[in-house]
Image (cartoon, helix red, strand yellow):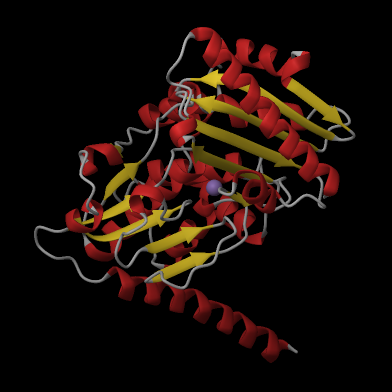
C-alpha cells in the first residue's frame, strides 16, 4: 500500500513538472529587443493577480520583464484601489494597437500569454498564443494551454511558480506583492473558497500563500467604498418595468451605463442572486450606447451559464455559475436620434432581451 501511495505522489510531481517544462518550451528563450506580453483581458482581482503572478514567473524563467496589458476600462473602484495599493502598472491594449488594424500585438511581442481570458476581437489573430484559464472553452490552436475548472486562475499560476521554486518573500523580486495579488484573486474569485468551483488546488494555493500575504495591504483593498451611482443602478433594477421575477429567476435591466460604470452589471447580478428565493440572476445593460453587456449568476445546477450567454447573446464565456457576454450593437447602437428616440430604442432592446432570457430560462 505504502509503495503504491508514494508512487502516486511521484507521478503527481511528474505531472506538475512536465506542465512547467512544456510551458518553458512554449515560452522560448529571451531575445534581445523583444518582449513577452501578458494579456489579462478586462481587469478583475483574478486577472490582475494572474497577470502579476505570470509576470513573476516569466521573470524567474527568462529574466525578462513582461508587459501587463488589459482591455476595456479599469471600471471597478476596488480594482483601481488594488492596482494602487500593490503598485501594479498596466498598459491599455489601445495604446499598443494605436488605431492600427494589423495584429500589432504579435508584431510588438515575441509571445503573448493570455491569463483568465482568451483571444477574441482585437486579439484574435495573435500568433501562437499561450493561455491559462478556467472558463469553459476549447481550441487546439494554442501553442500551450492550461485550462482547468477551478476557483481562480491565480491558483493555476501559483502551481507553476511553486513548481519553479519561486520564493514568496522579499528574497525574490516583489515576492510579497505577488503573494498578496495572487491570494486576493483566489479569495475574490472563489468567494473566500466557498464557491462551487473551488477545488483542492485553490485551497492548496491559498494555504501556501497566506503566510506571505501583506495583510495590511489586503485589508485596505477589501475595504474599498462603493461609488454613489451604485444606488441609482440598484434602484433602476428594482423598478417594475426593468425587471421580471419568474419562479427563482430574476432578469433585470440596468439601462444605459458609461464604460466606467460597466462593472455595475456584474455587481448587480451578484446582489440579486443572493436575494431569498432567487437562484439565477441575469442583469444586462447598454454600455456607451454601443454595446450590450450581460452578466449571469446562478446557484441552480440546472442552469448552464455558458450556454445561457451563447443562446441569448450568441457570445460570451462562463465558468460554473458565473458568466458574462458583450455584444457590439453595430448599426443598432443607440447613438443617434432625439432623446425620445433613444428612450424608445432602449425600451425595445430591453423588451427583446428580457423576452429572450425569460424564454430561455423557462425552457431550461
Ligand atoms: Mn477568473
Residue at far left of view: 33
Residue 289 sits above or below residue 45 on the image:
above
Q: Position of residue 230 (x, y in %)?
A: 59, 15
Front in this rendered view, residue 47 or 206: 47
**Residue at 54% across / 66% down in the picture?**
138
Left or right, residue 218 beside residue 128: right
**Residue at 45% across / 68% down in the picture?**
145
Left or right, residue 320 beside residue 135: right
**Residue at 44% across / 25% down in the picture?**
259
Q: Position of residue 264 (x, y in %)?
A: 57, 24
- Give residue 351's quadrant in the image: top right
Left or right, residue 28 beside residue 76: left
Q: Is residue 184 visible?
A: no
Q: Position of residue 300 (x, y in %)?
A: 82, 46
**Residue at 70% across / 19% down in the picture?**
237
Left or right, residue 93 beside residue 204: left
Amino acid at each position: 500500500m505504502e509503495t503504491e501511495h508514494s508512487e502516486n505522489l511521484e507521478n503527481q510531481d511528474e505531472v506538475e513538472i512536465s506542465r512547467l517544462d512544456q510551458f518553458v518550451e512554449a515560452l522560448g528563450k529571451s531575445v534581445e529587443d523583444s518582449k513577452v506580453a501578458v494579456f489579462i483581458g478586462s481587469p478583475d482581482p483574478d486577472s490582475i493577480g494572474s497577470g502579476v503572478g505570470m509576470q513573476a514567473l516569466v521573470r524567474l524563467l527568462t529574466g525578462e520583464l513582461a508587459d501587463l496589458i488589459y482591455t476595456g476600462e479599469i471600471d471597478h473602484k476596488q480594482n483601481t484601489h488594488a492596482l494602487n495599493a500593490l503598485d501594479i502598472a498596466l498598459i491599455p491594449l489601445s495604446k499598443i494597437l494605436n488605431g492600427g488594424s494589423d495584429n500589432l500585438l504579435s508584431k510588438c511581442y515575441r509571445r503573448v500569454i493570455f491569463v483568465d481570458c482568451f483571444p477574441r476581437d482585437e486579439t484574435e489573430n495573435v500568433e501562437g498564443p499561450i493561455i491559462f484559464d478556467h472558463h469553459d472553452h476549447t481550441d487546439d490552436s494554442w501553442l500551450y494551454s492550461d485550462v482547468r475548472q477551478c476557483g481562480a486562475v491565480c491558483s493555476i499560476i501559483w502551481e507553476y511558480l511553486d513548481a519553479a521554486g519561486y520564493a514568496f518573500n522579499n528574497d525574490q523580486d516583489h515576492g510579497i506583492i505577488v503573494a498578496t495579488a495572487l491570494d486576493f484573486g483566489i479569495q475574490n474569485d472563489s468567494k473566500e473558497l466557498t464557491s462551487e468551483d473551488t477545488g483542492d488546488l485553490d485551497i492548496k494555493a491559498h494555504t501556501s500563500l497566506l503566510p506571505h500575504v501583506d495583510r495590511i495591504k489586503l485589508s485596505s483593498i477589501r475595504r474599498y467604498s462603493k461609488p454613489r451611482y451604485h444606488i441609482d443602478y440598484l434602484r433602476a433594477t428594482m423598478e417594475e418595468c426593468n425587471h421580471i421575477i419568474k419562479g427563482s429567476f430574476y432578469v433585470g435591466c440596468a439601462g444605459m451605463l458609461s464604460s466606467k460604470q460597466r462593472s455595475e452589471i456584474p455587481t448587480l447580478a451578484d446582489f440579486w442572486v443572493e436575494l431569498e428565493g432567487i437562484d439565477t440572476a441575469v442583469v444586462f445593460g447598454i454600455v456607451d450606447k454601443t454595446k450590450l453587456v450581460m452578466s449571469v449568476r446562478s446557484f441552480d445546477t440546472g442552469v448552464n451559464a455558458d450556454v445561457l450567454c451563447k443562446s441569448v447573446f450568441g457570445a460570451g464565456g462562463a465558468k460554473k455559475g458565473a458568466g458574462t457576454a458583450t455584444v457590439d450593437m453595430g448599426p443598432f447602437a443607440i447613438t443617434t436620434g432625439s432623446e425620445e428616440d433613444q428612450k424608445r430604442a432602449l425600451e425595445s432592446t430591453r423588451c427583446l432581451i428580457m423576452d429572450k432570457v425569460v424564454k430561455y430560462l423557462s425552457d431550461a
